[in-house]
Image: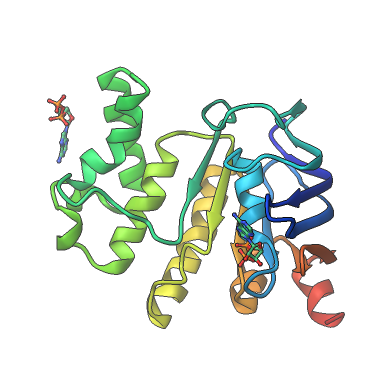
Amino acid sequence: SSGVSLEQVWKIYDNGYVAVADVTFEAAEGEFLVLLGPSGCGKTTLLRLVAGLETVSRGTIRIGDQVVNDVPPRDRDIAMVFQNYALYPHMTVYENMAFGLKLRRVPKAEIDRRVRAAARVLELEHLLDRRPHQLSGGQRQRVAVGRAIVREPRVFLFDEPLSNLDARLRVEMRAELARLHRELGRTMLYVTHDQVEAMTLGQRIVVLNQGRVQQIGTPLEVYHRP
Ligand code: ADP
Ligand code: ADP
């Protein structure tokens, strides 16, 4: 299985700040789970804990059946898409997507297969030779998603990936991410402060407030119990 579960997880930063307090939730295998809450409520911290970019102060994080508290990021079989999807400006779209795999010494033919598959899914096939400055904001964001897809991770983590796009592109990319989820069928944890985004993308929503879980439910359940 490749669900993600958090059990009574706490994150207390070195300065004593409690960013995540007693958080328990589970994303089922293949589920699109949204973490929703205002700025500063601990969403990014939670993603970074799942990714292994921060250490857990207390509690247990599992990916599939494995407790990953002490597993380094590269061994967690996850890929994260950031808000500031910094692409390498001197590299083409193809090279941007291939780069992480090259570092991991994935054979060239396999890299080529994965990049082409991701480019097909994201409709980037005609843009593989372009450099980032020759792309629109939405296209750049798709390349950032492509870099995650080629890793073929069990779990995708999205940290407000649409917040730098204009309103029209956001709507377009929302639909694309929903399609991507249907197509890949992978577990996705998606962080946002945008209620509409949460309602349209999430199969279930975890509502966070000041580091704590306030509510967990389907969009309808959350909408009717504000
Ligand atoms: P969100 O993603 O919901 O905006 P964050 O997880 O980024 O929230 O931050 C949660 C809280 O933890 C914020 O108040 C933030 O200032 C604090 N915080 C984040 N990183 C650190 C850190 N390295 N040291 C101390 N406090 C931090
Ligand atoms: P290297 O830098 O090791 O020579 P490259 O990145 O130049 O590797 O390319 C390796 C392979 O990836 C090429 O043989 C080609 O099949 C494919 N490739 C690279 N760039 C593109 C591109 N823009 N469009 C399509 N295929 C590409």
Q: Quadrant of ligand 1?
A: bottom right
In the image, what residue occupies the spot 29% across and 61% down? 139
Which residue is pictured at 51% across the width and 29% down the height? 74
The x and y percentages for residue 23 are 82, 53
The percent coordinates of residue 109 (x first, y second) are 26, 20
Q: Quadrant of the C terminus?
A: bottom right
Q: Is residue 24 above or below residue 155?
A: below
Left or right: 193 in relation to 100: right
Residue in the image at 71% along x and 60% along y: 203
Q: Residue at x 82, y 63 (%)?
A: 212
**Number of disc labels:** 0
Q: Please, is residue 111 above or below residue 54 in the view?
A: above
The way the protein has been coloured in the rendering is rainbow
Question: Is the residue 10 above or below the residue 83 in the image?
Answer: above
Answer with left or right where residue 184 lies relative to residue 193: left
In the picture, the quarter occupied by the N terminus is top right
**On the image, which quarter does residue 116 sit in?**
top left
The image position of residue 128, as x and y in percent, is 19, 46
Q: What is the x, y in percent for residue 58?
A: 82, 41
